[in-house]
Amino acid sequence: MYFLLLLIINLEVNSTVDSVVIYSDRVSVTRVAHVYLDKGTDIIFSGLPGTIDDASVHIKASGLKIGEVQVKMGYEKEPHPKVKELEAKIKTLEIEDRLLSDEILVLKDKEKFLQTIGVSGPDLISKELLTGKVSPESWRIGLRFMTDELLSAKKRGAEIERQRIDLGEKLNAARRELNDIRGIVENRKSVIFDCHPEVAKTYKIQLSYILYGAYWRPYYELRANPSVGRIDISYFSKISQRTNEDWDDTKIVLSTAKPALGGIAPEPAPWYINLYLPRPEETIRGGRADELERLAITTVATPEVAKAPPAPVEAGISIIYPLLGRYVLKSGDPEKKIQVYETTLNTEFEYFIIPRISSLAYSTGKMQNNTDYLFLSGEGSTYVGDDFTGKTYLPTVAPDESVTVSFGIDDRVKVKRELKKSKISKGGLFGNKTKYEFIYENSITNYHTKEIKCTIVDQVPIPQDPDIKVNGVKFEPKPTQEDKDLGVYYWQMPISSGKEYKITISFTVEAPRDREIEGLMP
């Protein structure tokens, strides 16, 4: 037995991140190492992030018998590149500050010298002038030179002080960042396990584990083309990676699974109520807290790495999206936008117009998801052609479902509202009513090269006082839909290319003669 133990050696292997499965709050990482083995060996994967979930570590190697797996704490043999970068930055700032400090000393010596000349200057000037050795003009030039030099030294000194204050702030920020990051990035783990090969050859060893600090979210670019009745939709993932591990040349799979929610459905318990009685603090600490901790541990499920072809694949109750190609994602970099899918969907465009409120026509498109992709809810940008029209939020759209998206304002549909008649009539000498008559005309003109569908909305006032009466409401043409309680009326119709559609609305309002109506006049 002692002889066999001597045959087992420690072998620290070089590994690379081959693939990752990114969830909404974590990532499953798979590392790969190729190792030649001809005898029993303790394999060591070192330099792994210290935030690895130890319980998630999994080893896979065809043809190898895997023994005990251990996860041990450790530290980087070499400083992490980010630590080196910050240390170099701090050193550069310190050198710059030292140079400025040295310049301050030189300026102070210069000021002392100039001030010394200033103290002895008056006596010397008097003697030189009396003996005629130096002309008054020469002394004036000399005095002007000393004054200019002294002012220049003081000005430069003030500039240096300001620069050193800025440098001090940068130095403090860099030192804080270094202190914050050093404990995180230099805190590493190693995975150690013994293995025994069946035959002497090169083995592919896969190490997988869970890390937190990575997530992905959907993002869309929707480009409307009303002239052909289509929307080009680009489905992107925005990936954030702060795992303290860089991914170079890595395959990426996105998953809609939510492992944090667990897989066990809750069970109902009796809903008891009672009069409040203060309880001892020890009972709260010892009972309920322990139960909550136990529940928190048992309800978290560990996701498994999914193998899938490069297309959306249903994996049980979730969907995975393998991304084509390989990618580089450095820990701490800004969000990376990667395209998941691109397609064109047939769309019914319609314009929503409320002339009383706005002279703008708002374009909407109703599109049907005729792809195999589940469009998850997420933010997006809308375009008409190449013109950016605004931001939007797309709800979850399953295959074969439809959704309506707003594409903003369309200048090729002109909206105009005119007050054709506004008349106020008093009720004669003995009348106690004032009558207001209004006629409005709405006109909508289609400057597109094809017919468009429109929903036009108009309103008549709704009295909030029994002494106010609205009568004689007339429309030409009549609305296709109405809500009299709210005073809202709808016209839904097509407008041909180059044509103008007009709607006339007339009504009267009566109110007490001595009262003013709020909100009536345009």
Image (cartoon, rainbow, N blue to C red):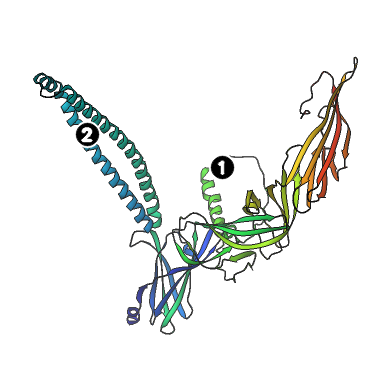
> Residue 184 placed where, x, y %?
41, 55
The quadrant in which the C terminus is found is: top right
Q: Is residue 8 left or right of residue 100?
A: right
Q: Residue at x 47, y 76 (%)?
A: 61
- In the rendered structure, which amino acid carries the disc numbered 1? Arg
- Left or right placement of residue 164 versus residue 339 in this view: left
Q: Nearer the viewer, residue 443 or 314?
A: 443
Residue at coordinates 35% horizontally, 74% vertically from top-left?
Answer: 10
Instruction: Assign a secondary structure to mark 1.
Output: loop
| Three-letter code for the amino acid on which mark 2 is drawn | Lys
CB atoms of marks 1 and 2 within 8 Å: no
Does residue 355 appear in this view? no
Q: Residue 493: x, y in percent?
A: 83, 49
Residue 515's place in the image compared with 256, above or below, is above
Examine the image and state in which quarter residue 41 appears: bottom left
Q: Which residue is mark 1?
A: 279
From mark 1 to mark 2, how far is it between C-alphas?
Answer: 71 Å
Location of residue 130 in the rendering, given as x and y in whole percent from the top left corner:
10, 18
Q: On the image, numbered disc 2 is attached to which residue?
A: 108
Q: Looking at the image, is mark 1 or mark 2 earlier in the sequence?
A: 2
Q: Give the label on residue 178, or none.
A: none
Residue that lies at the very extreme toward the top in this rendered image: 429
Q: Residue 305 sits in which quadrant?
A: bottom right
* Nearer-the-camera pick, 288 or 110: 110
How many labels, in total? Answer: 2
> Would you say residue 394 is visible in this rendering?
yes
Horizontal arrangement in the rendering, residue 163 relative to residue 203 (left or right): left
Above or below residue 41? Residue 314 is above
Q: Is residue 157 left or right of residue 326?
A: left
- On the image, the x and y values in percent for residue 280 come to 53, 42
Between 200 and 299, the one lying in front of the other is 200
